[in-house]
Image (spheres, rainbow, N blue to C red):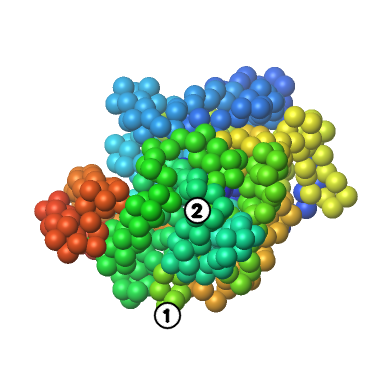
Amino acid sequence: MRRTLRTASALAFLVLALLASACAPSATATPTPAGPTDVPLTSVEVIRSTNMSQSYSDTLFTDFVKEKFKLDLRYTYYPSSTFQEKLSLSFSTNSYGDVLELVDSAIINRYSKDGFFQPLEGIIDSKLPNYRKAYSDEDWAFLLSSMSDAEGRLYALPVRMATGSTGSNIFFYRSAQFEKAGAKVPTTVEELYDGLMAIKTKINPNVTIPNQWGLANVYSGFDCAFRTQNVVWKDPDAGGQLVYGPITDKFRDLLIYMNKLYESGLLAKEFSTMSDEQFWSEYSAGNTYFCWRYPGFHNKKLNGLLTAAKIEPDWEYDLDNLLLSAYPDKGPLQQRYGTFYTATVAITDKLEADATALVLSYFDWSCTEEGQLFHEFGVEGETYEVAGDGIPSFIGKYSDATDTNKLGSYYGNLQDFGPFGYFLVENEAHANKFYPEYKESNAALKDFEYMDLFVPIPYRFSQAEETRQAELYVVVDSVSKEYQLSFIVGTKDPGSDADWNEYIGKMEKAGIDEYMQLLRDANARTVK
């Protein structure tokens, strides 16, 4: 999930990024299997989401690992839509695997209480030195505070992303179309509304704002403009206090605006249920005029879609206008990424000691330059080649730069995920080459305040608190989403004090105050 699991959140989730080493290694090493030939294979059952399936090269990948490490990795892919349900069933029926890849750390910590996972914090320095080397001491301390359980035990290894491939999403526009309609390229949310309505009236009555991945993603970009989030977060306008975004006045302003977009016919009527195919078809048809994505996405994806549809490719961005504002006196927030993602690798209690040692050896090797190149590119001469600049590029069927797959990648699945999906450390040199727009946009946004959208909030719950907050979350989240949807489509009026107070009352009845107090107390314990 490079920026789709970033975009989505979420694939929105997942949405996940390749992972970064502490230095920027030369990318010329070619992995060479070197394991003894007379050692018997050790079978390891690995669970992973279908979103990260090795669609091109399962055999290429597993054969190499067999030869080098004598590990027979046997993958089972759970559909992303039912991943948590299938995972829960596997634990309840004792049918879970030996290793879980790219599972959220909160899920790992939840099941670790029942002894399903092996603790790792005591063996990092001795067994995973290359993984540890990818983090500064400060980043490592934050990782431990964010990812460990209530007793400070670490059960999962998060993926480490390259500094050269991260930064805020930005807005792209088909600027020429705004100007053709007599509108200015927008700098505020109201100017965006006015510009889209002008395009709707003068150029294209089918202008639309499509949405991918449901209710949570419909706010993307607008949340930065309104300086709020659809989750619990540390609000800079509240002194950095933990708040539940969807009950704040700023979020009410956002809902009023989203309702305005919906009622005017700009926001797609199917925004909460739209499929990936429906979403991208609107771009291919030329019915979309702004987009909130990652730097470089306009020319590597959006203009490609228009070119394929024989429409003039006119997507661009302006370095002086990368974000929209809802409050010009305060300005917008940009997104901020931590040094790692909460998608993790974990070893279950099913794996015997000797097999665990082999898996740890393989994990640590994956963090070396050789291992990074293998996981991101495969085998030199077969899946990639190294040009004069020393940076790998995919070749043959693996060179899928023009692939317009439904996830909306930069280059296609391989360039986003590598031939074998994400692993533990992203190659910094490759990231610097393929994401030069990040350097440019990050420099342009250096003075903007941050929204810590992808930085995990650390908590230290007691077991009773963990259970209670999980119970409260289910109810609170259900009530909030029900009202958010109603406010956007207009069955409830977000501008009506009566309707808004009804919502707040329902949230209080659902336990929002108790829920937030539990989170604040648990977070306070992590602060030294």
Please provide percent x and percent y for residue 82. Answer: 38, 30
Taking the view exactly as shown, the residue that stands out farthest to the right is 388
Q: Residue at x 56, y 68 (%)?
A: 184
Q: Amino acid at mark 2?
A: Lys
- Of mark 1 and mark 2, the one earlier in the sequence is 2
Please provide percent x and percent y for residue 309. Answer: 67, 39
Nearest-to-viewer mark from 1 and 2: 2
Q: Residue at x 75, y 36 (%)?
A: 399
Q: Quadrant of the N terminus?
A: top right
In this rendering, the answer to whether 107 lies above or below 89 is below
Taking the view exactly as shown, the residue that stands out farthest to the bottom is 329
Disc 1 crowd rating (10 Å Cα; few below 14, some 14-19, many 20+) is few
Q: Can the viewer see residue 495 in this picture?
A: yes
Q: Amino acid at mark 1?
A: Asp
Q: Nearer the viewer, residue 98 or 395?
A: 395
Q: Which mark is residue 200?
A: 2
Q: Nearer the viewer, residue 209 or 219?
A: 209
Q: Secondary structure at mark 2?
A: helix
Q: Residue at x 38, y 53 (%)?
A: 264
Q: Residue at x 59, y 50 (%)?
A: 19
Q: Nearer the viewer, residue 119 or 477?
A: 477
Name the residue carrying label 1: 329
